[in-house]
């Protein structure tokens, strides 16, 4: 925060025209590099989501890594 305060003081010591240039440049940078503010979302309670555990009874999905490997081999190594 100390660096920000120094920068702020440096800008305030500039002539008004130069301060306007700094302001215009900051506006340009904000348009060039937009920041997407994180919306205030509540965390999901995944235990209550209907999709959690939807494949728990499938015997072919007991080892999901092996299942993915098998599917890849079937479709990509013909």
Image (tube, rainbow, N blue to C red):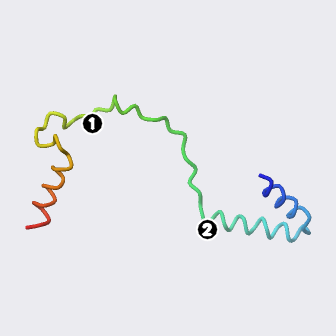
Which corner quadrant of the image does residue 12 belong to?
bottom right
Residue at (84% x, 59% y) in the render: 6
Residue neighbourhood size for the residue with mark 2, other residues' Cα within 10 Å, grouped as few (<14), some (14–19), many (≥20): few
Residue at (65% x, 63% y) in the render: 30
- The numbered mark, 1 or 2, whose residue comes first in the sequence reads 2
Query: SS of the residue at dot 2?
Result: helix
Which corner quadrant of the image does residue 33 belong to?
bottom right
Per the model, the C-alpha gap separating discs 1 and 2 is 39 Å
Residue neighbourhood size for the residue with mark 1, other residues' Cα within 10 Å, grouped as few (<14), some (14–19), many (≥20): few
Read off the residue under disc 2: 32
Total count of labels: 2
Q: In which quarter of the image is the C terminus?
A: bottom left
Which numbered disc covers residue 51?
A: 1
Residue at (79% x, 67% y) in the render: 22
Which numbered disc covers residue 70?
A: none
Q: Is 5 on the left or on the right of 69, as rendered?
A: right
The one of 51 and 61 positioned closer to us in this rendering: 61
Task: Tell me: residue 9, above or below residue 32.
Answer: above
Return the x and y of residue 64 as percentages of the image width and height: 20, 46
């Amino acid at each position: 925060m100390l660096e920000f305060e120094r920068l702020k003081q440096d800008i305030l010591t500039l002539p008004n025209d130069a301060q306007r240039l700094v302001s215009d440049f900051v506006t340009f940078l904000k348009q060039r590099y937009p920041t997407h503010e994180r919306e205030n979302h509540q965390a999901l309670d995944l235990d209550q989501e209907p999709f959690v555990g939807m494949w728990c009874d499938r015997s072919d999905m007991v080892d999901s890594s092996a299942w993915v490997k098998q599917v890849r081999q079937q479709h990509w190594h013909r």
